[in-house]
Amino acid sequence: MPINILMPALSPTMEKGNLAKWLKKEGEAVKTGDVIAEIETDKATMEYEAVDDGVMAKIVVPEGTNDVPVNQLIAVLAQEGEDPKVAAAAAGKGVPAPKPPTAASAATPSPQPSQPAAPSPQAKAPAPASSPKAAGEGARADGHGTNRAFSSPLARRLAKEAGIEIGRIAGSGPHGRVVARDVAAAKEGNGLRAPGAAAAAGPAVAPSMSDQQIRALYEEGSYELIPHDGMRRIIAQRLTASVQTIPHFYLTVDCDIGKLVAAREEINATAPKDKDSRPAYKLSVNDFVIKALALALQRVPDANVSWTEAGMLKHKHSDVGVAVALPGGLITPIIRNAETKSLSAISNEMKELTARAREKKLKPQEYQGGGSSVSNLGMYGIKDFTAVINPPQSTILAVGSGAERAVARNGKIEAAQIMSVTMSCDHRSVDGALGAQLIGAFKALIENPVMMLV
Amino acid sequence: MADTNFDIIIIGSGPGGYVTAIRAAQLGFSTAIVEREYLGGVCLNWGCIPTKALLRSAEIFHYLQHAKDYGLSAGEVSYDPSAVVKRSRAVAKRLNDGVGFLMKKNKVAVIWGEATIEAPGKVTVKAGRSEAPKGALGAGSYAAKHIIIATGARPRVLLGLEPDKKLIWTYFEAMVPDRVPKSLLVIGSGAIGIEFASFYRTLGAEVTVVEVLPQILPAEDSEIAAFARKSFEKQGIKIYTGAKVTKLDKKSDSVTATIDDGKGGTQTLTVDRVIAAVGVVGNTENLGLEKLGVKIERAAIVIDGACKTNVPGIYAIGDVAGPPLLAHKAEHEGVICVEAIKGLHPHPMDKRLIPGCTYCSPQIASVGLTEQAAKDKKLDVRVGHFPFVGNGKAIALGEDQGLVKVIFDKKTGQLLGAHMVGAEVTELIQGYVIAMNLETTEEELMHTVFPHPTLSEMMKEAVLDAYGRVLNM
């Protein structure tokens, strides 16, 4: 049997490499340990040593080819006594054909071709589906994508409930069909492929380490395995998808909230009280942030959008999500039409949503959708940080703590109440200048809260 | 000299054993099967099949008695018990011959006699209870790398209720009566007891059934069992549940039974014959298992998911390997057993998906969890019902008494169980069994088009009912 030489994984995270140079020509004898090729990764150029003796029968991927996926056939070695020509003809047997690119790679609006730059036999392979439709729906969880994952109806329902993509589950039923017991096993971390290895995903996503590999790094008994609940899985899945598919960039500004703090005190002090002398409202700084962001989105309507393959969804109202920490996770209930609501209305609605979020009683329509979100870690003393966009929103505002800081004004150092905020933007839908306009509008409002009345 | 060395020797040629032998032969193993009495075992010769022949006679008799209901006249209707039994035996014989043919066709050697496992890999066979069929190997020493025990089960004997085979019968005698007794006491209301009660009642016997548990057909859903009970009582069968036969006094041609009604009262009942149908126990004895250290618990050989015992090279399948004691469970275990030996990695059987059928009138068929069992498992359920009176085909057949019941997991839509009582339900249940094996949810069942007019339409209606969408009620 001829030996197939595959693109090696030279590091655990390597997903593809450039075939820099062949050091053996077709027809040349190869001995174990001979360097046959130089492989270039983003980190280094490494030598590829032969692990078998034989004759180089066929070079499949010519030198100078970039972005060759790991495990792709690159050459064929004829073993001793084998006719190199026959071996060359048998090239590629038992090696999976190159898979179509993933949703992630197809969705990247990169002007560079994703095919290898130099001509190679792979170029003759059927063109992978890279239409906008495939990009948008590439990894459909219901198994009807191009790489259909066969599964039982019950398994699909259980997987959906557990927040596990069915394509990631190794099937044990007839012909690899995913059945209910496989979902149960996957919830325990058994037979669960890393997201990159999912049937619908291709070589563009690095296969992460398997559970077994990770567990092998720690001594048995030195850890406790806490099973994931559905919320944990959904957070992992959605936020991984977010950073993998959304090109994030970040804009930070410092806001002087001196006026806001004063206004808040005044408003809260004069709140009408009911017969039990409970105030009708008690505004938090975050309530002002929500309102300011909602109004800023109205002032910069081009940034109040969601990216879709078909076009930009330009939202008419400002639906602002607010991250609420829960034991073991978080959720972002949404204040709808926040630009039309008074601060006290926002404040009371937020209290009510938070309470129900903690009881896990929110309806999906109360936390799905939205145009932007607020994530506030100010209460933990965090000065500034960046947040991961909650798709299909285009922006998220990470709010740090408000504290007295020294600022220079007209050549003098003064103390001021400063709050740093960082806006994460989806570059597909919001460019730098537009993002700057949005955060500028926010800054103007939060520094002059009286403007929110206009 | 015939070969005495095999890859696999199977002890017992019941439905489990002979199917195992065929599958083993298909997989390329040299295979032998040991039988001491009759090819096909109890199922073909003294169980499933001959009783179905008897019940068919009773059913046709019943139809003829009710010919008028269908606008027909049948004149004077009567039966000849010996002819009824003769037909039943002929059916059994035909299938018994069929097993012989299948063994030959698949080149499975038949060894005639009683087997003892001397050591792993070694089987000694002594002369059997009946004459060896043509071409069978005889007593002697045989060797096989894998030995599969498929020796089945026999009627359980309770102290004080020992069958004497004349007045107190087991199913063996009940199957070949010389006449139909005027009165009959059936002890035990499992499938065997109820089928004989139904058969003899249809032929005119006064039948009393005593069940120690609170419901008849204890394995069935309580709603279905209650429905069946009402139906039996309407036919004139007397039923005592939560009651116990404490004594049987044998006279020359009758038996007086003392029945403890479970509420502190006792009564006596004199009947012509008694059928003891208090369950069956595995045939684990005289195989040499104790000496080999094969683990046995509650009269059943302990096996794993691939039918292996704790002793390497020794396997067990079917009734002798524990409940449910059903031919179709034995067959499937046998297939798993030899496929695992072959290295095919079959999945262990999911016992929740084994259907059960009782061929009394009305018939009973079920699969999966009963409503109570589902609730005991703390499952949140949705239950759907559909009665035969709502089905056109049932009314046309003149069989409008029956019920279909389904149980779904409220959270996942998984079909947890299905239970049916009424005409032909034993032929219907496989639809739900397939659905459960394919892990369908209510959605796929609702999207399935069932043919009209059939009894099967009730199966869909019951599903719809579970979700508040029933149409014909």
Image: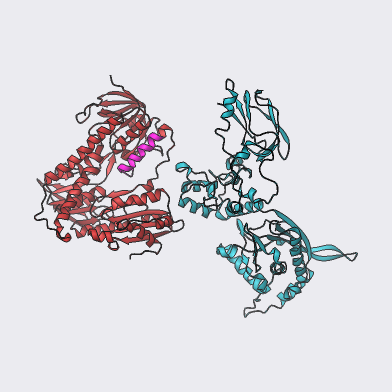
Chain identifier matching the red colour in the rendered picture = B
- What hue represents chain A? cyan
Magenta stretch, residue numbers: B322-339
* Front-lying residue, B460 or B4: B460
Split into 4 quadrants, where in the image is the N terminus of chain B?
top left
Vertical arrangement, residue A148 with respect to residue A90, above or below: below
User: Position of B35 compared to A39: left or right?
Assistant: left
Q: Position of residue B279 (x, y in %)?
A: 26, 45
Q: Position of residue B9 (x, y in %)?
A: 33, 29
Q: What residue sits 36% from the left and 39% below the top?
A: B333
Q: Position of residue A32 (x, y in %)?
A: 65, 24
> In the rendered image, is residue B176 in sight?
no
Q: What residue sits 32% from the left and 43% below the top?
A: B328
Question: How many numbered discs sit on the rendered protein?
Answer: 0
Q: What residue sits 29% from the left and 31% below the top?
A: B105
User: Position of B179 compared to B312: left or right?
Assistant: left
Is A194 part of what is drawn in magenta? no
Question: Outermost residue toward the top?
Answer: B1
Q: How is the image coloured?
A: by chain
Split into 4 quadrants, where in the image is the C terminus of chain B?
bottom left
